[in-house]
């Protein structure tokens, strides 16, 4: 097994200490920080996503794998220099909308986006439209990902989009939404750019939204 | 006897007449009439005993064990053990003097007149007419909540009622429905309308608001706290009910968040606040409710368990109706089933789902992580009923929510599961679920002998409240200040504990 294959397996198995060790070893062997993403982290998280979609992995396994991936990205991020640092896939403002405190799904999406190479600005839960606008301005985000788990709070996604529009930012960001009660139709009706039915889909969607 | 034969069942004292095919289990017939089966219909208790006044009803070994020679001779049977093989007239013991039979020190003064107790559930309604002098139940009526077509669970109903016109329409709908249930109680019992003095209603916070016509907006978002959750009192005219103008209708006060007077009534019924020993009350439903503590301190919480316990979002899930597998047991490495209504299996209801997963864990078809072993994608229980991987995931979400809530309340009390001396499982599902399966999947982390199926504690508490409406010691007013509501979602640890509780326990970790 190659170094990268070994690392992929350790991420999938959720072995954070092993991932950390392998990352440090590979760096000592002269592997460039930017190489880890396409060769180990992204393929590993793609596999985690596949297993999640096939119901093989459930929330605990996904969270543990994402934490293991983070053991690598925490080491690598500060080492990315110049070009490499700015060559991130994009900057995403993630949040659970106002009135809603569910954060597990949002955290999984954020961690998977992070391991797919996105820069994450996580606003946590109960995030007001004003907070979203402020974060987009401050971090020059090109993507906003909003989550809601209640039929009564998903209306606040609409409020978030309206706030971005009135701040003149709507054309500068793509907006994606998700969460148990959210549907493709709902996403379209509130003027979002896309709907991620699960975390792996959200990652694919994020990639295609920033590519356009 | 041909297979198509049907028999007549006349119930006393309600005078309800039913017809059902030969071989129908009495349990299924009576359950629909609001009869409860405290041990889950296992023949382990005597809670469902009935007296056969006419017609022949079999006696089996379980009944010989639980009933004396004398009782059997006098026509006593355990309803859960009987099938229909003749036209019968049956007297329902359970509705008779349920309060008086209780040898408790609960102080109640017999009162003149009649009272009505109503358990206003999100899905079902139960109303009982009581003779307040004797404590006898004179009539019972159950119905599906007519609001359900505007949202099956509390949140979707809150969403619908965000519109003021909808709110008023929902309030009208439920008031009319309960008014008509009361009319039916009067008709069935031939009671005098003018004798009804008091009506007590209990229900969760959303049901409280939707009955009283209160704005549900505060319940639609964090912090989910009612602004008007107190006792609401109405006159018959306010509600358009055909009762004496002097009759008083009370909707008992909410405890906080989504935890309403149904749980308050449950605490009253189980006397958790009177014991120095640590006790707990768990109502399993779409919104699971949990109370833990003792006479010194009681904490309560609600937790969104999702609809898995009701068979919803399960690929072959269904309500506890004819054709539902309600029980799965493992005998010598093969599965045995109980199907409701003596019919061919069509799907799984909540108790069957819990049993099936527990059986899968015992047979190592399912791993403690919840994943099928050996790359299996689904498990055929009995054709055509299949358990899928995502069904198991849905159950994990439901049980994780309840177990995490329980865990956090215990933490706040500085206690552990081992300190809990008695756990009451309330509600219809609590009646049917197998305690050992609930324990096997980690829904309850307590030895089985500490778990008691408590039946409809909301209704029992509402009945008890009818006898002590003026706030003396032991009544609901005294309890209000003893029970503290814990908003689980705002607890920083909740999400982590929830994720921890998603897995099923390893066999060595199931308490014995």
Image: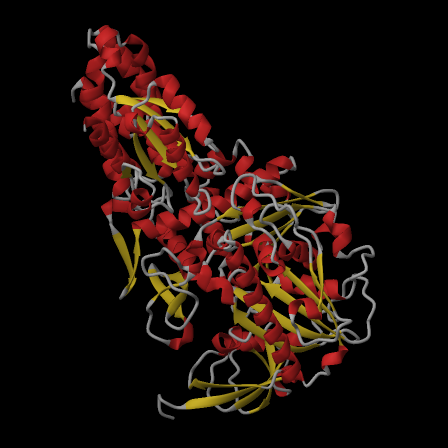
Q: Viewer-proximal residue, B53 or B480?
A: B480
Query: Residue visible at 57% across and 62% down?
Result: B171
Q: Is residue B38 visible?
A: no
Q: How is the image coloured?
A: secondary structure
Query: Residue visible at 82% across and 72% down?
Result: B111
Q: Viewer-proximal residue, A35 or B37?
A: A35
The answer to which image quadrant residue A115 occupies is: top left
Tell me the quadrant of the picture where the N terminus of chain B can be found.
Answer: bottom left
Q: Pinpoint residue B24: horizontal percent, then vertical percent.
A: 44, 81
| Total marks in image | 0
Q: Is residue A140 left or right of residue B469?
A: left
Q: Pinpoint residue B476: horizontal percent, then vertical percent.
A: 74, 55
* Extreme-left residue of the structure: A2
Q: Pinpoint residue B72: horizontal percent, then vertical percent.
A: 61, 83
Q: Is residue B462 left or right of residue B79?
A: right
The answer to which image quadrant residue B126 occupies is: bottom right
Q: Viewer-proximal residue, B488 or B91?
A: B488
Q: Viewer-proximal residue, A114 or B47?
A: A114
Image position of B39 with respect to A12: above or below = below
Image position of A97 with respect to B163: above or below = above
Query: Residue visible at 44% across and 45% down?
Result: A150
The answer to which image quadrant residue A200 occupies is: top left
Query: Residue visible at 82% across and 71% down?
Result: B110
Q: Is residue A81 visible?
A: yes
Q: Pinpoint residue B142: horizontal percent, then vertical percent.
A: 56, 72
């Amino acid at each position: 097994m190659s170094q990268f294959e070994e690392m992929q397996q350790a991420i999938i198995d959720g072995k954070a200490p092993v991932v950390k060790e392998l990352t440090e070893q590979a760096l000592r062997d002269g592997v460039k920080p930017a190489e880890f993403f396409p060769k180990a982290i992204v393929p590993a998280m793609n596999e985690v996503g596949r297993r999640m979609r096939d119901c093989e992995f459930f929330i605990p396994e996904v969270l543990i794998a994402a934490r293991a991936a983070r053991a690598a990205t925490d080491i690598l991020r500060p080492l990315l220099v110049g070009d490499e640092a700015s060559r991130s896939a994009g900057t995403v403002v993630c949040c659970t909308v106002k009135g809603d405190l569910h954060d597990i799904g949002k955290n999984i999406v954020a961690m998977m986006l992070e391991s797919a190479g996105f820069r994450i600005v996580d606003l946590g839960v109960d995030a007001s439209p004003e907070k979203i606008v402020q974060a987009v301005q401050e971090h020059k985000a090109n993507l906003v990902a909003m989550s809601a788990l209640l039929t009564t709070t998903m209306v606040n996604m609409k409020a978030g989009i309206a706030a971005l529009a009135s701040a003149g930012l709507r054309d500068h960001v793509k907006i994606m939404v998700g969460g148990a009660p959210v549907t493709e139709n709902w996403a379209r009706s509130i003027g979002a750019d896309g709907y991620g039915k699960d975390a792996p889909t959200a990652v694919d969607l994020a990639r295609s939204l920033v590519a356009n | 006897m041909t297979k198509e034969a049907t028999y007549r069942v006349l119930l006393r004292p309600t005078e309800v007449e039913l017809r059902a095919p030969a071989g129908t289990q009495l349990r299924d017939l009576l359950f629909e009439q609001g009869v409860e089966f405290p041990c889950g219909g296992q023949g382990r208790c005597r809670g469902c005993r009935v007296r056969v006044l006419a017609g022949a009803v079999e006696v089996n070994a379980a009944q010989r064990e639980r009933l004396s020679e004398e009782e059997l001779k006098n026509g006593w049977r355990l309803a859960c053990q009987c099938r229909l093989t003749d036209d019968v007239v049956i007297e329902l013991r359970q509705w008779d003097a349920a309060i008086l039979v209780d040898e408790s020190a609960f102080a109640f003064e017999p009162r003149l007149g009649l009272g009505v107790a109503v358990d206003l559930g999100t899905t079902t309604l139960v109303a009982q007419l009581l003779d307040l002098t004797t404590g006898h139940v004179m009539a019972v009526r159950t119905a599906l909540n007519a609001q359900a077509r505007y949202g099956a669970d509390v949140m979707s109903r809150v969403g619908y009622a965000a519109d003021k016109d909808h709110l008023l329409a929902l309030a009208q709908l439920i008031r009319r429905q309960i008014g008509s249930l009361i009319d039916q109680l009067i008709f069935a019992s031939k009671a005098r309308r003018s004798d009804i003095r008091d009506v007590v209603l209990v229900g969760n916070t959303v049901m409280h608001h939707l009955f009283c016509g209160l704005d549900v907006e505060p319940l639609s978002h964090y912090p989910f706290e009612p602004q008007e959750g107190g006792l609401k009192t109405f006159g018959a005219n306010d509600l358009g009910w055909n009762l004496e103008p002097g009759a008083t209708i009370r909707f008992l006060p909410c405890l906080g968040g989504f935890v309403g007077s149904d749980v308050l009534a449950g605490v009253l019924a189980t006397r958790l606040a009177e014991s120095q020993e640590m006790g707990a009350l768990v109502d399993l439903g779409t919104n699971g409710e949990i109370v833990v503590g003792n006479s010194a301190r009681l904490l309560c919480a609600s937790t969104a368990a999702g609809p898995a316990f009701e068979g919803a979002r399960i690929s072959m899930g269904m309500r506890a109706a004819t054709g539902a597998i309600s029980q799965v047991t493992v005998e010598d490495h093969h599965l045995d089933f109980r199907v409701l209504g003596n019919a061919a299996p069509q799907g799984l209801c909540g108790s069957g789902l819990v049993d099936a997963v527990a059986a899968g864990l015992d047979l190592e078809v399912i791993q403690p992580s919840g994943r099928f072993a050996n790359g299996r994608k689904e498990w055929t229980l009995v054709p055509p009923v299949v358990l899928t991987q995502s069904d198991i995931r849905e159950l994990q979400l439901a049980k994780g929510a309840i177990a995490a809530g329980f865990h956090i309340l215990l933490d706040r009390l500085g206690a552990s599961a081992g300190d809990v001396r008695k756990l009451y499982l309330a509600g219809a599902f609590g009646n049917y679920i197998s305690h050992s399966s609930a324990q096997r999947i980690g829904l309850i982390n307590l030895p089985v002998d500490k778990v008691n199926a408590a039946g409809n504690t909301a209704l029992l508490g509402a009945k008890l409240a009818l006898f002590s409406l003026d706030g003396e010691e032991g009544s609901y007013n005294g309890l209000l200040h003893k029970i503290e509501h814990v908003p689980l979602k705002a607890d920083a640890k909740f999400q982590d504990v929830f994720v921890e509780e998603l897995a099923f326990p390893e066999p060595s970790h199931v308490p014995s």
